[in-house]
Image (cartoon, rainbow, N blue to C red):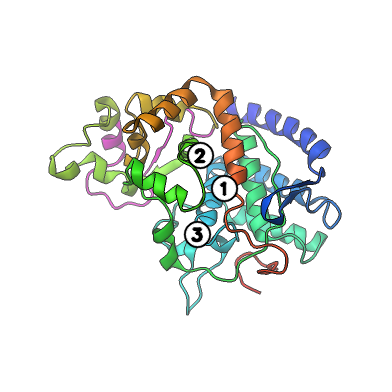
Amino acid sequence: MILKMNIHSSKVFFALFLAFSCLCVQLEAQLRVGFYCNSCPLAERIVREEVMKGFMNDKGIAPGLVRMHFHDCFVRGCDGSVLIDSTSSNTAEKDSPANSPSLRGFEVIDNAKTRLESQCKGVVSCADILAFAARDSVAITRGQSYNVPSGRRDGRVSSESEVLQNLPGFSFNVDQLTQNFANKNLTQEEMVTLSGAHTLGRSHCTSVGSRLYNFNGTNGPDSTLESKYAGQLQQQCPEGSTDSSLVVSMDPQTPFVTDVNYYQDLLANRGLFTSDQTLLSNSNTANEVNQNARNQFLWMRKFAAAMVKMGQIEVLTGNAGEIRANCRVIN
C-alpha cells in the first residue's frame, strides 16, 4: 500500500515538475531554478527516473540519498565531494566511519550521471544530481517537493579527515548541535527542522549501542529512553555486537514515509540518538518539536525551505571547481 501511494504521489510530482522545473528563479550564490532548461532540458527528469528505479528496487535508497546530500553539504559545502572514491594516496569522505557503510544510493547517482553524459556531455554537475536526487527522494516518500536551485560545480578535494570535524555527532547535545549548524549558517530552528529527516531510514546498531548498555556507567540504558522502547532496541541490538548488518528503523512506525512521527516519538521519549532526544532539553527546541509534531503541513513546508537553504552551503559556481565526467573520479 505504501509503495502504491508513493508511486501515485511521484506521478503527481512529475506532472508538476514538467510544468514548473524550467521557471528560472535567481537565488543566492548564482544558483537558479531551471539552470539546465536550455543546456540539458531533461536533466531533472532523468535524475528523477533513476531515483524512482532505485526506490522500487530498495526503499532504503530514498533515505540514503537524503542523508548523502546532508553529509555532502556539511563537508566542504554542496560540491559532490562525498561521491569521490578513495585512491591509493587519499582516503576520501565516503570512507569515513561516519559515512561507511551508512550512506547508500551511490549507484543511483552513477546511473543518472551516465545517462546525462550521453544526453549532454560535460554539462550537469554531480553536486546538482545529488541535490535533485535528495529532493526527489523526499517527494517519493510522500514529503513535499520543492524547486532545487542549480548551477553547482563539483569539488576536486575529498578527505576523510574533514568529515568528523564537520558532521554533527550522534552524542551531541542541543548546544553542540546548534553551534554545528550555525557554523553552516543554519539557525537553531532549521536544525530542529532538518533533524526531522530522521523520520526516514535506518541506523546501524553500532551507532546506538552506547545508549542501551551501561550508559555513562549506570549498568543500564539511557534513562531518557522510554523503557519499552529501550527493551525493543536491546532485542534488535545485542550487547557488544559489532555486526554491521544489524540495523534499527529510526522511525519504527513509518520508516519510509516523510512525516512527523519522528517528532511524536521524541515527545514519547523514543528518540533513537542522544542528538535526537536532546531537542527536548531546551525550551526553544522543545517548542519547535511540539509545533512540528502537531502540524505536518507546517513542518513539511519548513523542511523543504531548509533543504533549499542547506543546498546552498559553500557552493562552487561559475568557473570554480569542475563538471566531473564520472562522479567517483576527479577529472
Question: What residue does disc 2 label?
Answer: 190
Dot 3, crowdedness within 10 Å: few (<14), some or many (≥20)? many
Asked whether the viewer can see residue 57, the reply is no
Look at the numbered disc 3 and give the secondary structure of its residue: loop
Q: Going 42% across and 62% down the picture, which residue do you hit?
A: 96
Q: Give yes or no for contact between labels 1 and 3 (Cβ–Cβ under 8 Å).
A: no
First in residue order: circle 1 vs circle 3: 3
Asked whether the viewer can see residue 262, the reply is yes
Which image quadrant: the C terminus?
bottom right
Q: Going 57% across and 33% down the picture, which residue do you hit?
A: 302
Q: In front: 49, or 139?
A: 139
329 sits left or right of 213 in the view: right
Name the front one of labels 3 and 2.
2
- Residue 209 picture location, percent across and down: 27, 45
Q: Going 79% across and 33% down the picture, which residue do you hit?
A: 15
Residue placed furthest toward the right: 38
Residue range (magenta): 232-256
| Residue type, mark 1 in image | Met
What label sits on residue 131 in the rendered view?
Answer: none
| Residue type, mark 2 in image | Glu
- Residue 104 picture location, percent across and down: 52, 51
Residue 80: which quarter of the image? bottom right
First in residue order: circle 1 vs circle 2: 2
- Residue 140 picture location, percent across and down: 64, 36
Q: Give yes or no for contact between labels 1 and 2 (Cβ–Cβ under 8 Å).
A: yes
Question: What residue does disc 1 label?
Answer: 310
- The CA span between labels 3 and 2 is 18 Å
Question: What residue does disc 3 label?
Answer: 75
Look at the numbered disc 2 and give the secondary structure of its residue: helix
- The CA span between labels 1 and 2 is 9 Å
Q: Main secondary structure of the magenta part?
A: loop
